[in-house]
Image (cartoon, helix red, strand yellow):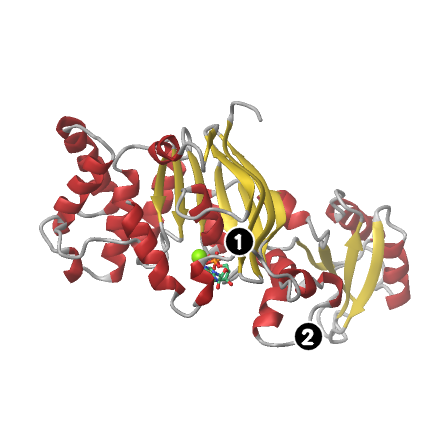
Amino acid sequence: MSTDVMIYASGLTKRYGSFKALDDVSFEVAKGEVVGFLGPNGAGKSTTMRILTCFISPTSGTAKVRGHDVFDDTLAVRASIGYLPQRAPLYLEMTVYEYLEFAARVRNLDPVTFKKRARQVIEICGLAQSLSKEIRHLSHGYRQRVGLAQALIHDPPILILDEPTSDLDPNERSEFLNYLKQIGKDRTVLLSTHNLKEVEAACARAIIVSRGRVVADGPLDEIRAKSGRVRYIVSVQESAGDAPYRGKGPLPRQSEVEDALSKLPGVTKVVELPTDERAHSYELAGEDGIDLRPEIFRLVADKGWVLLELHRDTQTLEDVFRQLTIGDARRNRQLGPVKEDDRDADHYDEDEEDEDDEEESDDDSDSDDDDGDDERNER
Ligand SMILES: Nc1ncnc2c1ncn2[C@@H]1O[C@H](COP(=O)(O)OP(=O)(O)OP(=O)(O)O)[C@@H](O)[C@H]1O
Ligand SMILES: [Mg+2]
């Protein structure tokens, strides 16, 4: 493990009874990285984050934060991390300022450092007008800001943020993302969110989990290219109608255009698209790593045809996300498993009795409340 590795997870598995919430999750996050941690509901994001922040232990596997083991060295781990849980446990009867003071005391901040840090986090989190309000009187979004403020108060080198922007309004969300970009320059951030635009705005890398497993991990560009689905849409004028034809060559026949496009180097597939009689339109697929647009343009220009349309669609992060996690959605809707991505059998070990079953597993229905209590008690 290099010294630059700030978060290290290896083979993390978490079982609740016979249910595997995490299944052999491994990844590393290096110093200065801002990593989006993505996955559908129930994929295991919060579970992973709670292990990394010492709130629950995995059934098996290892996790280290800044080289400190999350089992053996919890104090050092917690000192390095600012953690915003998905449902931040707040002391509702405290005012915002009292709560920040409390969070700072827990972090052993001296009063002078606290005042300095408090000024900064109050500004970042937009809490200036709410400092004397009791937390129980705050809206969801403001409570989330308070949760965020406590995660930042000790200026930690590592931030683990579980859906930090889910309750923020669009203005605050974009302010927060700007801030994240700034702090990401010299800090390490693991950020879970369902908002893929946010990931594109703030993260260079993403880890996607689905049903407890890592299904993609890498730079966003690599993840987008993962499916290899780049397509080109090309339309060439077929008829000028009543208007004068402006092409240098004669109006092309359909077979001529299709044939010429198929012969371009790098083109692997040409499919004709339905159009009106004014255009021949095609969808092209090409070899990975080659941009076909210059060749297509040159061909059309050489032939003297009139190019009506040429564009390339790379897959969006959302397309890839849906493709990689479709099994979760189908399972939730009780549709059959997806053949090429059939992991249902692995997710539940119906026959295996687990010796390490935790109390929490006895009652799944109120696990949220359990979570809150755990986090509050351990604070
Ligand atoms: N205490 C618990 N007892 C039993 N099952 C649990 C417990 N905590 C989590 N789980 C289950 O583990 C799985 C992963 O949950 P987790 O909260 O990590 O998902 P997530 O990716 O954070 O989802 P979301 O996007 O909805 O926040 C879910 O199926 C959840 O029901
Ligand atoms: Mg979660």
Q: Is residue 254 left or right of residue 332?
A: right
Under circle 2, the secondary element is loop
Q: Residue at x 48, y 28 (%)?
A: 67
How many other residues sit within 10 Å of disc 1, few (<14), some (14-19) or many (≥20)? few
Location of the C terminus by quadrant is top left
Q: Residue furthest left?
A: 132
Question: Residue type at mark 2?
Answer: Gly
Query: Is 46 on the left or on the right of 259, as rendered?
Result: left
Task: Give the residue number, with chain letter if any, for mark 1.
Answer: 356
Residue for point 33% across, 46% down: 176
Above-or-below relation of 54 to 277: above
Does residue 294 appear to the left or right of 374 in the view shown? right
Instruction: Give amino acid for label 1.
Output: Asp
92 above or below 336?
above
Helix, strand or loop status at disc 1: loop
Sequence-wise first label, 2 or 1: 2
Q: Where is 223 relative to 114, above or below?
A: below
Pointers 2 and 1 in contact (CB under 8 A)? no
Residue 185 rendering spot, x and y as whole percentages? 42, 31
Can I make out residue 235 in this image?
no
- Quarter, ligand 2: bottom left
Q: Residue at x 63, y 49 (%)?
A: 224
The answer to which of 68 and 286 lies nearer the viewer is 68
Q: Quadrant of residue 242?
A: bottom right
**Residue at the disc numbered 2:** 336
